[in-house]
Amino acid sequence: MKRVVVGLSGGVDSSVAAYLLQQQGYEVIGLFMKNWHDESVTISDECPWVEDSNDALLVAEKLGIPFQTIDLSKTYKKRIVDYMFAEYEAGRTPNPDVLCNREIKFDTFLEHALQLNADFVATGHYCRKKTMEKDGKEVHRLLVGKDNHKDQSYFLCQLNQKQLGRALFPIGDLTKPQVRRIASDQHLVTAGKKDSQGLCFIGKVRLPDFLQQQLKPKTGLVYEIDAQHRLFKDHSWGKAAFASDTEKFDHLSAPFIYAPEQGMIRGQHQGAHYYTIGQRKGLGIGGTPKPLFIIGTDVKENVIYTGQGEDHPGLFRKGLFIDANEVHWVRPDRKLTTGGSCRFGIRIRYRQPLEGGELYMREKGLYILFDQPQKSITPGQFAAWYDGEELIGSGVIHA
């Protein structure tokens, strides 16, 4: 009998995952990850992990499976929280959920499961894994979940073949209503529980309060850049001539660079590192015909640049760049070599519809050029590329 350690989060998805694996004949062990109890940094006034841990225990007791709690808080602080602070301080916007899966659930948690002689680890992610043979080797394919509204493959975009080989996703072929129905039929305490919000296995985070604990407020100016500024005309997609393909790619993927003299002062902010591209709320500045959206930040000069309206040209770009060291292939056998290119469906944020585009691999990194200009391309976030239903690779957006 194969042994599976399930990451019981105290939610309905992982609860049903454990139940389904039990029904499939696996020996199931429930494990709850305690990822936070650092009193020096308060993530939330609430303490949701206590309730979640109790619910996970009740589910394990209902299913009659062994249950443990594992304290991963030191690792979580080092690999996730400290990383978040560093990224925001540098003016980038990290994605902690992607990192949590790569660094915690399918790394530290997986190592602990293997110490329990587990053959697999399982989570309640809405995605699927299919294994095939290619050139005499097993190749694991990461596929989108059947529920289009809940597909979570994007959050797993940094997993490698070794991690996927040990992973099971029992609810990937189900929709959320089906999962809740199963939980209700089995009288699991989590059947009607709302979906968790915020950081994985921690709960909702009040981000401004969270960041201010280590990134101190620093008053700076907010500038507005007019939509008709020549900067946007000079940065046209169809520049006549380029000395090389790389020059062309650099031009099309480069972010707009603003200067205070290009705009007009609209107000003040409390720290450029608290804000991100595309953000509308949080500035507290009114009096403009259209709402102000953040189109650029400069943490060195502590300046924020904004534009009026969600159609402001400063919000849109044709491409992006990923440094060579940050390019990751879930399917290494489909890796682009230097000079190579390929079309994929691309996603730059969770739940975004796939956008058509071309990937170009060059010595210094990967360029992604979209068929249509994309809104709010954000350094620090992850771009993931798909071939139909399969996630092929991903990378941290450099610019």
Image (cartoon, grey):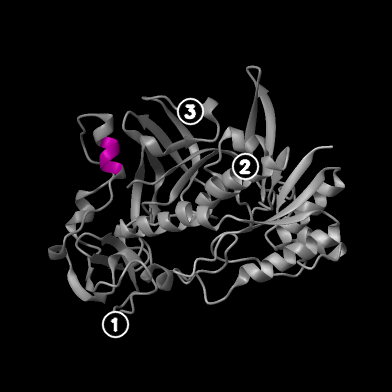
Residue furthest out toward the bottom: 287
* Mark 1 surroundings within 10 Å by alpha-carbon count, few (fewer than 14), some (14 through 19), many (20 or more): few
Q: Quadrant of the N terminus?
A: top right
- Using the image as rendered, state which of residue 202 and residue 307 is in the foreground: 202
How dense is the environment of label 3, judged by Cα within 10 Å: few (below 14), some, or many (20 and up)?
some
Q: Residues within 10 Å of mark 2 (few under 14, many from 20)?
A: some
Q: Position of residue 104 (x, y in %)?
A: 56, 49
Name the N-terminal-most of marks 3 and 1: 1
- Label 3 or label 1, whichever lies nearer to me, is 3
Q: Which residues are magenta?
A: 248-252
Q: Is residue 80 above or below residue 267?
A: above
Drawn side of residue 81 relative to residue 28, left or right: left
Task: Specify the amino acid type for callout 3.
Answer: Lys
CA gap between label 3 and label 2 equals: 27 Å
Q: Identify the mark at residue 111; answer none if there is no mark.
A: 2
Looking at the picture, which amino acid does disc 1 mark? Answer: Gly
Q: Which mark is residue 335?
A: 3
Where is residue 299 drawn, in percent x and y?
Answer: 25, 61
Determine which residue is flagged by label 1. Answer: 287
Tell me: 118 left or right of 343. Answer: right
